[in-house]
């Protein structure tokens, strides 16, 4: 009976997958029953600068910035969800910022396509621990999670953010980047234990023209968490920025003083 072990193996795989999903759901529900209390309040973000530069995985010398006008959101580490594992890779490139600068630690999360994650409760816990460690880096005022979660990964992401918020000090702000469709469409962001969601107005594909025309006409994103900030890139100019309190700016190359000066002029118009 050579086919029996194969059938049994498949059966076990189905059982394990279902069990993992049930554990994630239970983990999510438990996140609100552990005494955690966080309500969205835009006032928590008033101390952040109006313009924040994303500093990605490349050498960045930004010690010439005016810390009162410009903050830095730097890639602190990248986390890979791989099978039943959580693999972490720290930042390897140098970064310099001026004394007193508002610093945001960004953690990028990626799901491995070659070995899709099982999205287990253990991965929720391990990933939240990895992200929370970024808050202990020097002068970090906020942690920002960058994860393009698919529809099937949303429950996992919600559970991760709930666990992460419980691990972070109450004084540490929590932000996420958000696809524009998350903010305008089905709005699954409601109730997330975060302080802001930054709509990404670049690398949007075919939806970009539609979203930007709506924003230029004065429309706002449905999700309140998306209404205070916007993310743009210097290689995809936005003719008319929406009225927001903070603008995050991405640069596909290392920042130069002239690029920073141009960004400051554009964002202050």
Image: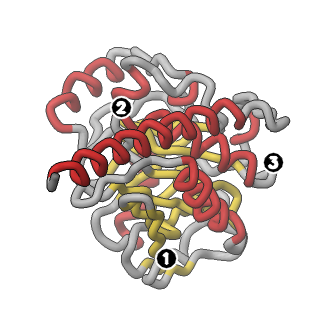
| Between discs 1 and 3, the one toward the N terminus | 1
Disc marking residue 34: none
Judging from the image, what secondary structure is the residue with disc 2 in? helix
Residue at 15% from the left image edge and 31% from the top image edge: 206
SS class of the residue under badge 1?
strand
- The x, y position of residue 261, in whole percent, is 42, 62
Disc ID at residue 151: 2
Q: CA distance from mark 1 to mark 2?
A: 27 Å
**What residue is shown at x 16% (from left), y 52% (from top)?**
1
Residue found at x 84% / y 35%: 35
What label does residue 90 carry, if any? Answer: 1
Query: Which percent across, then down, holds residue 33?
Result: 78, 31
Q: Is residue 36 above or below residue 219?
A: below
Q: Marks 3 and 2: which is nearer the front?
A: 2
For label 3, the residue is: 170
Residue 253 x, y percent position in the rendering? 29, 70
In-image side of 41 versus 61 (left or right): right
């Amino acid at each position: 009976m050579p086919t029996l072990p194969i059938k049994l193996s498949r059966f076990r795989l189905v059982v394990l997958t279902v069990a993992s999903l049930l554990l994630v759901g239970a983990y999510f529900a438990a996140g609100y029953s552990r005494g955690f209390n966080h309500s969205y309040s835009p006032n928590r973000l008033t101390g952040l600068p109006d313009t924040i530069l994303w500093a990605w995985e490349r050498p960045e010398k930004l010690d010439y910035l005016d810390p009162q006008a410009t903050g830095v959101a730097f890639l602190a580490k990248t986390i890979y969800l791989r099978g039943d594992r959580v693999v972490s890779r720290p930042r390897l490139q140098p970064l310099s910022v001026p004394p007193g600068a508002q610093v945001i630690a960004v953690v990028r999360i990626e799901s491995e396509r070659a070995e899709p994650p099982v999205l287990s409760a253990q991965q929720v816990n391990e990933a939240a621990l990895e992200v929370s460690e970024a808050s202990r880096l020097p002068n970090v005022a906020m942690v920002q999670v960058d994860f393009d979660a698919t529809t099937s990964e949303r429950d996992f992401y919600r559970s991760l953010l709930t666990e992460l918020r419980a691990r972070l000090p109450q004084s540490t702000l929590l932000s996420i980047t958000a696809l524009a469709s998350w903010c305008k469409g089905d709005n699954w962001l409601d109730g997330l234990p975060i302080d802001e969601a930054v709509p990404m107005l670049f690398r949007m594909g075919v939806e970009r023209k539609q979203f930007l025309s709506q924003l230029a006409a004065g429309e706002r994103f449905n999700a309140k968490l998306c209404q205070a900030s916007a993310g743009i890139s210097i290689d995809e100019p936005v003719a008319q920025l929406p009225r927001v309190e903070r603008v995050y700016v991405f640069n596909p190359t290392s920042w130069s003083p002239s690029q920073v000066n141009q960004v400051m002029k554009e964002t202050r118009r």
